[in-house]
Amino acid sequence: MKSPTLLDGKAISEKIRNGIASELKKTNADGNNPPTLATILVGNNPASETYVNMKVKACASVGMLSKYVRLPEETTTEELLSEINKLNADKSVHGILLQHPVPHQIDERRCFDAILPEKDVDGVTTHSFGKLSMGSEAYFPCTPYGMILLLKEYGIEVAGKHAVVVGRSPILGKPMAIMLTNLDATVTLCHSKTKDLPELVKQADIVVGAVGKPEFIKSEWIKEGAVLLDAGYNVGNVGDIEISKAKDKSSYFTPVPGGVGPMTIAVLLLQTLYSYQGKFSPPLK
């Protein structure tokens, strides 16, 4: 078997971002009307603050503007909905991102679904999920879409392959399973109540780690030549797959960090550009 290939999300995300910057130089030559991404952060979660700051810097790097809405920890659902509605009505705002997680007293799903579909550049609304499941154009959840773009960039064939997705969150595991299905993979979606998980993973041509537990998917579960996509990022700079050992058995693998994470932000910027241009991400096929 040939040596495994590292799926370089950092390099591919840079390529996407350069393309966005170039496109904006053409479509907004005078620089007076750039795309604007509004990010809402509720509370004082340090990790969330870090992510928001990364997104603000990423916007600036491609010529986009950021609108940063910071709300206190005690914000209610109704107060958050009011802020979202203001951004929905603001014609200068092209994308809205509500940073997850929000404090426990807030109905997060209700707030996500208040974002207008045409501004849902993070792909988190029920409407966007439904469009994705039907194979329509939409804004897709950024992390799974980033993984799909990595597969496409490296010419990795998905059709006819058996993919095992470990994790079923509505903005990661479930949409990834749907995207792979839309690309003609046969998908097994696993979770905390799945029986014989190691045996299922051993059958996979493509393994997606999306469970949020450090190195949960063990190297001995991986079959020779599998493609490893690790969407996890845990304490100690490790993902959800035991990549340090499993990568030697793989054909392709994403490193942690530097694999899926940079692609997530690149897709967020790409879909903000699409919103600015008045279009959605195209169907996957």
Image (spheres, grey):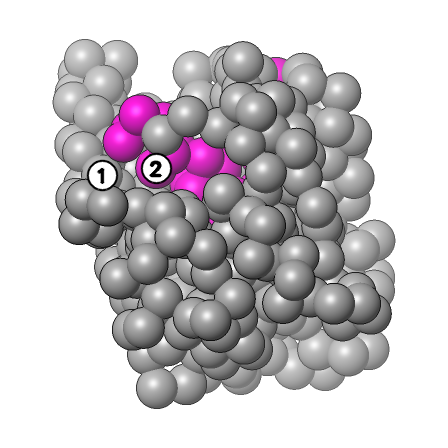
Q: Is residue 59 visible?
A: no
Quadrant placement of the N terminus: top left
Q: Which residue is mark 2?
A: 150
Amino acid type at mark 2: Leu
Q: Which mark is residue 251?
A: none
Q: Residue at x 60, y 29 (%)?
A: 185
Up the image or down, 74 lies above or below 153; here it is: below
Residue 213 versus residue 122: which sits nearer the camera?
213
Residue 151 screen position, x and y as percent: 37, 34
Lateral position of residue 229 relative to residue 72, left or right: left
**Label located before the other in sequence (1 or 2):** 1
Lateral position of residue 190 relative to residue 2, left or right: right
Q: Residue at x 67, y 39 (%)?
A: 187
Report, in whole angstroms, how far the alpha carbon at label 1 lies from the one at label 2.
7 Å
> What secondary structure prevails in the magenta region?
helix
Q: Residues within 10 Å of mark 2 (few under 14, many from 20)?
A: many
Q: Residues within 10 Å of mark 1 (few under 14, many from 20)?
A: many
The mark closer to the camera, 1 or 2, is 2
Residue 202 screen position, x and y as percent: 56, 57
Lateral position of residue 251 relative to residue 141, left or right: left
Q: Is residue 153 visible?
A: yes
Residue 276 versus residue 223: which sits nearer the camera?
223
Residue 19 screen position, x and y as percent: 20, 25
Q: Which residues are magenta?
A: 137-155
Amino acid type at mark 1: Ile
